[in-house]
Image (cartoon, helix red, strand yellow):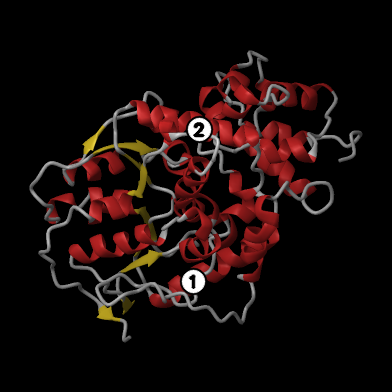
Amino acid sequence: MDKTATVDERALKDANAFLCLECGKCTSTCVVARYNRSYSPRRLISQALAGGRLPTSQELSICLTCMACDARCPSGVRFVDLIRELRRATYGAEFAGNCSHGGAMQSLMKLMTAAELNQDRLAWVTDDLKTADEGDVAFFVGCAPYFDAFFTELEVDTLAGVKGAVKVINALGIAPVVLPDERCCGHDLLWGGDVEHFEILARRNVELLRAKGVKTVVFNCPECYYTFKADYADVVGALPFEVKHLSEFLAERAGELNFVDDEGEKVTFQDPCRLARFAGVVEPPREVLTAAGVELAEMPRSGKGAVCCAGNGWLNCDRFSKEVQLERLREARATGATTLVTACPKCEIHFRCAMKDPNLGDEIKMEIRDLASTVASRLENKKAKPKGKETEE
């Protein structure tokens, strides 16, 4: 990147960068800086203010955009907003991201912007799951079907969370609408600076859901949920439906679910960044796990203080990312829990990847399960008849 290029003053103002006290709390909080000593959010802010120097493409890629630094800043500096704006402003010219997996995920997302796209989106719907063509409640699947196909060597099963979500929604007497032509929500493209393709996906998804006349859209993926909730309005205006994360949707109706009456396993919970820090959804997942009879053992850093899985939208994956993941897995094991429950498919993928390290023993090994599949496994066999016009198979 051109070292003489400068940061736009408007971007600095919007991020409250001029309020920076140079106290260093952002850097001391940053989990990447803990292992990568050459990386410092405080120094990047100071350089931008002093001479307006743009961060290098590598520095822009390293940031996990987990918002841990923003949450601790005493001056309200929004470092994450600045990083996203700089990625957008320099996308395609200086910044393209240090894409992991050869940029395959980004290519897939761009392919989904095609107007005429023939997908087999509903191949995962088995006979025991009830979905609908019409109804008040829709379920947004996300990219789990593609993740499972791409990460087979990691033995991931993010579709278990998707199926578990539908199973629990069915247990409430609802057959959710699912879209045969659903597209990627565009989260990673937006945070990677590719606003053009993100906006195409946003318009397409809202158009598809609007055509179904749904009143509520439920999400299992926290990134899809937050993207709809916080970013889609900038593209399409006010959404014509309400958005709910599955944990919120279930917590409001937990009394309507019948769970097995026996002692549940001991688990610990990984709070996704977009769900806890960004959207402020902390208690609903715990309320649902408790209602299901699961024993919850909290990690010292949980809720809005939870540690990121070091995913970063498939932009960067290096030895420092692995150190962050290993540290988190050790923290999870230290709780005495047998299972790490996640509420994000990327958390599952990244933690499973870390556990594949052949140089490590059993010190970090533990079962990893999705929140929805965990709750679904605790349901009694009693099922209410789902409401809605069922999809014809």
- Note whether residue 306 is visible: no
Q: Nearer the viewer, residue 361 or 270?
A: 361
Q: Nearer the viewer, residue 247 or 366?
A: 366
Residue at left offset 50%, top offset 53%:
154
Q: Which mark is residue 116?
A: none
Dot 1 corresponds to which residue? 182
Task: Work out whether mark 2 precedes mark 1 in sequence or the reverse, and give the earlier one.
Answer: 1
SS for callout 2 = helix
In this view, 8 is above or below 172: above
Residues tagged 2 and 1 counted as in contact (Cβ below 8 A): no
Q: Which quarter of the rendering shows the C terminus?
A: bottom left
Residue at left offset 23%, top offset 68%:
174
Labels in figure, total: 2
SS for callout 1 = loop
Q: Residues within 10 Å of mark 1 (few under 14, many from 20)?
A: many
Amino acid marked by disc 1: Glu
Q: Give the side of residue 5 with respect to residue 47, left or right.
A: right
Q: Which mark is residue 326?
A: 2
* Res 214 → quadrant: bottom left
Q: Give the side of residue 329 with respect to residue 34, left or right.
A: left
Amino acid marked by disc 2: Leu
Residue 375, given in percent of the width and then of the height, sits at: 24, 51
Q: Nearer the viewer, mark 2 or mark 1?
A: 2
Residue at left offset 72%, top offset 45%:
87
In this view, 95 is above or below 205: above
Residue 22, given in percent of the width and then of the height, sits at: 68, 15
Residue 377, given in percent of the width and then of the height, sits at: 22, 55
